[in-house]
Amino acid sequence: MKNINKLILLFTMAFVLGSIVTSCNKDKESTSGGGEPRITYVRVTNPVSSDSLLIGAAQGKLIAIMGENLGGAVEMWFNDQKANLNPTYITNTTIIVNVPSQIPLAIDNKLKIVFKNGKTLLYDFQVQISKPVVNNMLSEFVNDGEVATIRGNYFYAPLTVTFTGGVVGEIVSLKDQEIEVRIPAGAQVGPVIVKTNFGETKSNFWFRDDRNHFLNSDPYEGWWNSSYVVSTPGPTDPPKISGNYIRFTKQLGSWSWNELAGGPASAMPVHSRNIPDAAILKPEDYYLKFEVNTLKPYNTNVVKINFALNAEDNDAYKWNPPYDTKGKWQTVVIPLEEVFATYRVKPTVNPSGYWTRLLLGHAPGDWDADIAFDNFRVVPKVLD
């Protein structure tokens, strides 16, 4: 009887031990992806939108791949671009990964997972490659034959830049976020179009923007200092980019007072009415823009840009340092609502025109000033 009980006990222990081993093996399989891998769906990672399923995603997008037996994944490819897998974000049922930002050279619209046992899994998934994003130009005024810089994103070769008038510029250099393009003869005022194999985008800004100039010295108007206007540049002057421009060269002390240009509406009959009513009523839809060239750094004191005023105000908006273009023309872009937010009196529409004044100084700090300005304008942020 004792022998029978011993046999039963040994049999029971063997059965329990076998069950434990089997259970451990199953647990190991469940965490290592030992079963047949399968993708059930792909979704966004935001918990609020977790029911949003995806058949494709943009470059750089964070996605969650849902399935079974995925824990053994060691590589993942979108088309011919390898994704960066983080083991922390890999489980048997989920892989969280960023779609590669690099542009694929060979496109098969497949997601491929390689597992440590050598198996592979293919899944239909499209990488939605972005069309160009065109943000701005380093300078919106560049002469024919010279090189302009366009900044944005998703600038993938082959790429073309077409100017209003239908002429195409020569690409001098190309990066994902920057194009250097030589301005062709025949380039006209208006937007530029950047085109790649993945789409085209028309800029919201205008090249050589001639809209709504309220101060540009073409013709010179106002009460003060026509002597600062450069009509025929000398060998030490910056080149002309849009007719005449203003250049101011002077050693300034703290709290000095320097009038560069401007005056009441009656003294500026051409320019004083150029600010559109819509900009006064909805400044959030507009920019203040102008071109500047610092032959010496603007590193102290202040520049005061007073415009869209119904009466004299010499402290309406202060454009503060530092700013250094290193002797090149650049476009300054300031949201108009930020400008008007500094005004003591809210601008109102005036059909008779507006008071304008450009001042340097009247602030602390000695400044060895050598600075040029052109094309003060108020323009829409986006194309109509």
Image (spheres, grey):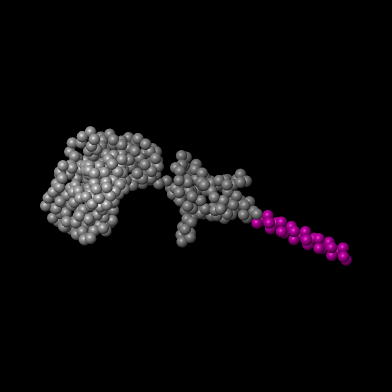
Outermost left residue: 266
In the rendered structure, the answer to whether residue 361 lies left or right of residue 160 reads left
Quadrant (top left/top right/bottom left/bottom right) for the N terminus: bottom right
Residue 159 in view of the camera: yes
Q: How many marks?
A: 0
Residue at 20 percent across and 36 percent down: it is 233
The answer to whether residue 237 is left or right of residue 60 is left
Residue 148 point in image, percent of width and height: 31, 39
Compared with 354, 153 (above or below) is above
Image location of residue 156, percent across then percent down:
40, 41
Give the x, y percent position of residue 307: 20, 53
Q: Report the magenta residues as a range.
A: 1-27
Please tell me whether residue 278 is drawn above or below residue 226 in the rendered image.
below
- Is 346 above or below relative to 107? below
Q: Is residue 6 in the magenta section?
A: yes
Residue for point 29% across, 48% down: 300
Front in this rendered view, residue 91 or 214: 214
Q: Position of residue 126 (x, y in %)?
A: 46, 47
Question: Taking the image as drawn, is residue 274 in sight?
Answer: no
Residue 210 position by quadrant: top left
In-image side of 124 versus 159 (left or right) = right
Q: Quadrant of residue 208?
A: top left
Residue depicted at 22% across the width and 56% down the height:
316
- Residue drawn at 15 percent across, 43 percent down: 226
Majority secondary structure in the magenta region: helix
Q: Is residue 3 magenta?
A: yes
